[in-house]
Image: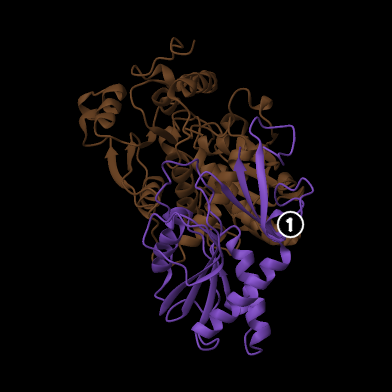
Amino acid sequence: MRHLLSTEDLSLHNAIRILDTAEEMAAVGEREVKKLPALRGRTVVNLFFEDSTRTRISFEAAAKRLSADVINFAAKGSSVSKGESLKDTAQTLAAMGADAVVIRHWASGAPHRLAATDWIDAAVINAGDGTHEHPTQALLDAFTMRRHWSKLAGTPSAGADLKGMRVAIAGDVLHSRVARSNVWLLRTLGAEVTLVAPPTLLPIGVEKWPCAVSFDLDETLAQGVDAMMMLRVQGERMNASFFPTTREYSRRWGFDDNRLRALDSLGLKDTIIMHPGPMNRGLEISAAAADSPRSTVLAQVRNGVSVRMAALYLLLSGENREPAAAAVSASAAASAAASSDAPAAHAANPNLTYSHQESH
Amino acid sequence: MTSVPSAPGPAQVVLTRVVLNQADIDRALTRIAHEILEANKGSQDLVLLGIPRRGYPLAVRLAAKIAAADPTVDAAAIVGQLDVTMFRDDLSHQPTRPPYPTQLPRTGIDNKVVVLIDDVLYSGRTIRAALDAIIDLGRPRIVRLAVLIDRGHRELPIRADHVGKNLPTSSSEKVRVRLEETDSAGGGATDGAPVNEVVIEATA
């Protein structure tokens, strides 16, 4: 593993390795000295072209717990607002000697572009690109689910996968990189995924994804669900009439108090309720559901630091990092897949051209 | 070139020599257990921390022997495992190592007499990492070191307090410790070789 760009091409071996390492990293968070010297002298740059609270703070905490130096870069207030291109920004960071770049970008495929070119010789971690992927969020969700699933089975979670777990992901799948990353990763780990959304909020080609699709949340719950993941309604991306009113959305697709009670009457006493945050309380999730003992929202945030520590450790330690040339062709192929996944987002971005000249 | 086994496989011919068999290991551990009790003047405040992978099973065996010698000791309550991966000084020169769990005894290690236990003492760098790891976990009163094999070639000013066997070796040789807990079927490479032994491998 040289970069962490998507969960679609993450092998089961690597996924389990990240989750197992995260298990050990979680123990560090409970110690008196919450710091390990593993990445001393390494520099991690948080390159955020899009607003974020928990992902950026989580990556910052993870890097600092491993003793790496952290440079935070936000597009607002930087030369990006003067029109600097991604290439120039990347080369500036390379000149400063960054060992890893954590990038969030509004354009799908930007991290792949960074990884596939020779602009910067650093490990690239995708922290969310447009409407494409958000691999560390999927990994922390899987980590949270695996802990729950192993606790139910009474087995240690290290080395385990999610075989047989029924996961429903409900809400704005169209704009959700969290949903995409989760579908690929959970498929790899052996869980059964059902997407629940209004037809207007499902992407074209969803029938080819390795998951079931439902339009009725109550019906999906009645069939039995072990983990219920609610997605945020992304107000900033609601530029068309995807649903008539927020009240109607909340009633039909939100996890409200009635559905919380329904879990009990359906006998689903071990079902957990997940949300990647930030929550729109009262819209896709009711306050009672978000604060119920079933909710894993805060556990997800806590696990996020462990999972990101594991990813940084596995990418930055060790001398057996693949030579750049091999990584280029692999990543370019991945970005080809990315470009077919969300074409709309690319058209708006003049800095990113998807030529494949590098990948002979 | 007299007793070279004509085993097919790797291009290099490997000469192996058994230095300790199961009974030898058992006797060495029994002696170390009594030495630990003697040096500590009893079992007061004693904590045994094994370094993964093979230090931990050795720590468990030592604790059982200490408990046999001193009935007031609960073997399970004094044993722990200490992972030192994150504290190594060669992290960026070696293939990525997966970390192992660190488990301390319930009593913790503050003001305890901690005995670090590992299978082979070589450069001393693992023990240096272990000392750093301990400092992040608490402040023991005393830290001691017990190893099954001391093969020399130290690169740091570190010395073991209790040694199972001093083994003069060439640095081109490899010392392999096989234990049934880590190297029996399913655990590691078996190929029918007996477990619980210490072997020197030299490439001819």
Measured as percent of width and height from the top left, residue A97 is found at 28, 34
Q: Nearer the viewer, residue A64 or B178?
A: B178
Instruction: Say if residue B176 shows up in the picture.
Output: yes
Q: Nearer the viewer, residue B141 or A317?
A: B141
The image quadrant that residue A90 belongs to is top left
Which residue is located at x 43 percent, y 11 percent? A355
The image quadrant that residue A70 belongs to is top left
Q: Which chain is purple?
A: B
Which residue is located at x 28 percent, y 39 percent? A73
Q: Please give left or right for residue B203 compared with residue A65 in the image.
A: right
Which residue is located at x 39 percent, y 54 percent? B155
Task: Say what amino acid the circle numbered 1 marks.
Answer: Val
Q: Please give left or right for residue B111 compared with residue A180 in the image.
A: left
Host chain of mark 1: B
Q: Which residue is mark 1?
A: B195
Measured as percent of width and height from the top left, residue A51 is found at 35, 40
Which residue is located at x 66 percent, y 89 percent? B71
Chain A: drawing colour:
brown
